[in-house]
Image (tube, grey):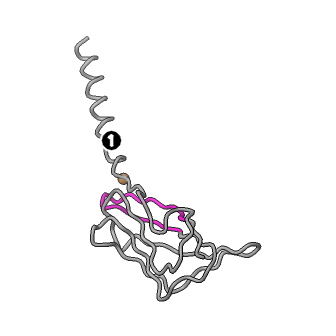
Amino acid sequence: MNVVRNAGLVLAVAVAAMAAPVLAHPKLLSSTPAADATAGNVKEISLKFSEALMGPVSGADLMMDMKGMEPMKMTGLKTSVGKDGKTLVATLDKPLPAGHYSLNWHVVSTDTHRVAGKLAFTVK
Ligand SMILES: [Cu+2]
């Protein structure tokens, strides 16, 4: 009886230990511009995450979306990790022209977990 009960306890502890790192997946907390927002004079896009990021393997592509056309990749985008270590910052040489955009981002947290997503916004 005791052996069976202890085996169950050991298993429960092992499952809890395995589940713990999942909590450390980088989660997007907020962004500027915000998702689906309309903004003016956008020269920088920042995404704040819940975990510290590894800069060299985190990045993003900015696409301009036009009706009836393939999304056009915007050139000159540079990405880096902000001073807080948890913000992905994408900067442009000059403010974006008016239009609809999608930022396809990917980040790797310091626990090596990779998460990707898409941020859509409009520039007026
Ligand atoms: Cu993780």
Return the x and y of residue 70 as percentages of the image width and height.
70, 75
Q: Is residue 118 magenta?
A: yes
Task: From the image, tell me which residue sits under label 1.
Answer: 18
Return the x and y of residue 96 as percentages of the image width and height.
55, 82
Q: Secondary structure at mark 1?
A: helix
Return the x and y of residue 89 as percentages of the image width and height.
40, 74
How many marks do you count on the picture?
Answer: 1
Point out the image quarter for the N terminus. top left
Does residue 123 appear to the left or right of 42 in the view shown?
right
Does residue 31 appear to the left or right of 24 in the view shown?
right
Q: State whether residue 32 is above or below residue 26.
A: below
| Region in magenta | 104-119
In the picture as drawn, the residue positioned furthest to the right comes out as 68
Q: State whether residue 66 is above or below residue 116.
A: below
Q: Main secondary structure of the magenta part?
A: strand
- Front in this rendered view, residue 51 or 36: 36
Q: Is residue 17 magenta?
A: no
> Which of the 4 image quarters holds residue 51?
bottom left
Amino acid at the residue labelled 1: Met
> Which of the 4 image quarters holds residue 32?
bottom left
**Which residue is at a point 53% across and 70% down the rendered structure image?**
103
- Front in this rendered view, residue 4 or 75: 75
> Which of the 4 image quarters holds residue 2?
top left
- Front in this rendered view, residue 45 or 8: 45
In the picture as drawn, the residue positioned furthest to the top comes out as 1
**Which residue is at a point 53% across and 68% down the rendered structure image?**
104
Q: Residues within 10 Å of mark 1 (few under 14, many from 20)?
A: few
Q: State whether residue 10 is above or below residue 100.
A: above
